[in-house]
Image (cartoon, rainbow, N blue to C red):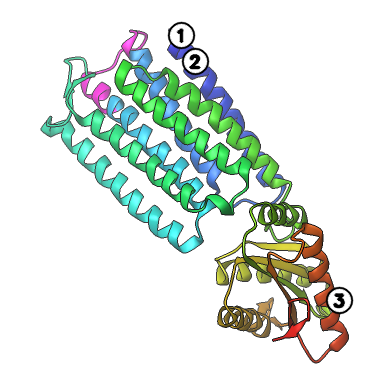
Amino acid sequence: MELIVAEFVSFFIVAGILVEHLRSKKASYHLKKDAITSVALSYVFYLLTSIITHLFIRGYLSLEPWIAQFLTMLHILAIPTYILFWMHAIERRLLPPKPARTLGQVQFIALGLVLLISFSDLALRKLFVFSPIGLIVDGRGVLYILFLCALFIFVQMYVLVLRWRRIPGYVRNLFLFSSFFLLLSLVFFQWFKQPYLLGLSSTFMLLLSYLVWQRRELTLDLLTRIPNYTAYLEHLKHVVRTAQETTILMLDIENFRLINDRYGNAHGDVFLQRFATKLETSIPSGPVFRLFGNRFAIILPHQSHNGIVRIVKDIRSIANEGFLIEEMHISCHVNIAIVETPLKTNTVEEIVESLDYTMAEIKERRRLSVIIFNQKLVPL
């Protein structure tokens, strides 16, 4: 009975998180499906199947054997489903969009095959052996499913190790901690045949992840939904602390006030939103930030001269092509200041001041729209 009570408590906690999360998204007009929503929904599904299954086992529900078999299978398969959603949400945070999408497709195909084989086994009875009332009593199917769950977790941990230096310490500690607890929960699930630790640890880690998401919301720009100046400074601190070699670009849309005056502030806002989205999709190797107004920044791993030239061309192409907004074509000209780290004293203040100084030089010289800061301001 204690297990059922714990699952009911977990269900109401997660349901509360989900409702509050959806409400806050609706209030901010950011209705796109995201990681928290997917993970919470998949975990709510697991908890529902778990509660019904355990009520049946305790004799509080009466079900036909075939219904009990189907429900038991749903309960077991809900575990790799929600773990995959959880691990893929982390991989999307760690990897650029294209590799994350490819990895996710492979993992979801693997899950789909396992689902198909497992439900087919309801008739074949090769992997799962059921009791007369419809409960799993033998077979290696559950063990294989737990192995699949562990594989999803190990893949995520491998990605975490690969991107270790590129993410803030509190984020990687959360990801590592949650992965360790899930693995330990799977061991206890197989060893003691009880999902106590799996349910409680999952609820705790989901709640903690939601609090981290709430913290992240404070570092998103309200208009463009990309990281804001606060997130930019946090990322610079991480760059300085880990002595990373990076190439930082500051972008300034020249005379943006004229776009607002000519087309209206509403169209200017739409232009900024599309410009930010295009930057994120066209230059996926580093985060894009909106610093304020018409100024953006991109923090990339160290780039060669040819790499910088290629990125600058991509940015100029985005600006020159512009966007069609309500039958009005709006384009712009972008000035780009570039700083490569580590610098001499390698502090956040030095990086910020170097970028500001370089941008001021661009505006003063006029004929140069791109300058790399290297103590002598070498023009590109």
Asked if labels 2 and 1 touch by Cβ distance under 8 angstroms, the answer is yes
Residue bearing the label numbered 3: 257
Q: Residue 218: within the magenta?
A: no
Residue bearing the label numbered 2: 6
| Relative image position of residue 372 (x, y in whole percent) | 72, 79
For the C terminus, which image quadrant? bottom right
Decide which of 52, 282 is in the foreground and name it: 282
The local secondary structure at tag 3 comes to: helix
- In the figure, is residue 187 to the left or right of 379? left
For the residue marked with disc 2, what is the amino acid? Answer: Ala
| Relative image position of residue 194 (x, y in whole percent) | 35, 17
| Relative image position of residue 321 (x, y in whole percent) | 64, 84
Q: Which residues are magenta?
A: 57-70
Give the Cα distance between marks 1 and 3: 63 Å
Asked if labels 2 and 3 touch by Cβ distance under 8 angstroms, the answer is no
Local crowd size for mark 1, using a 10 Å CA cut-off: few (<14), some (14–19), many (≥20): few
- Residue depicted at x 12% and y 31%: 126
For the N terminus, which image quadrant? top left
Residue bearing the label numbered 1: 2
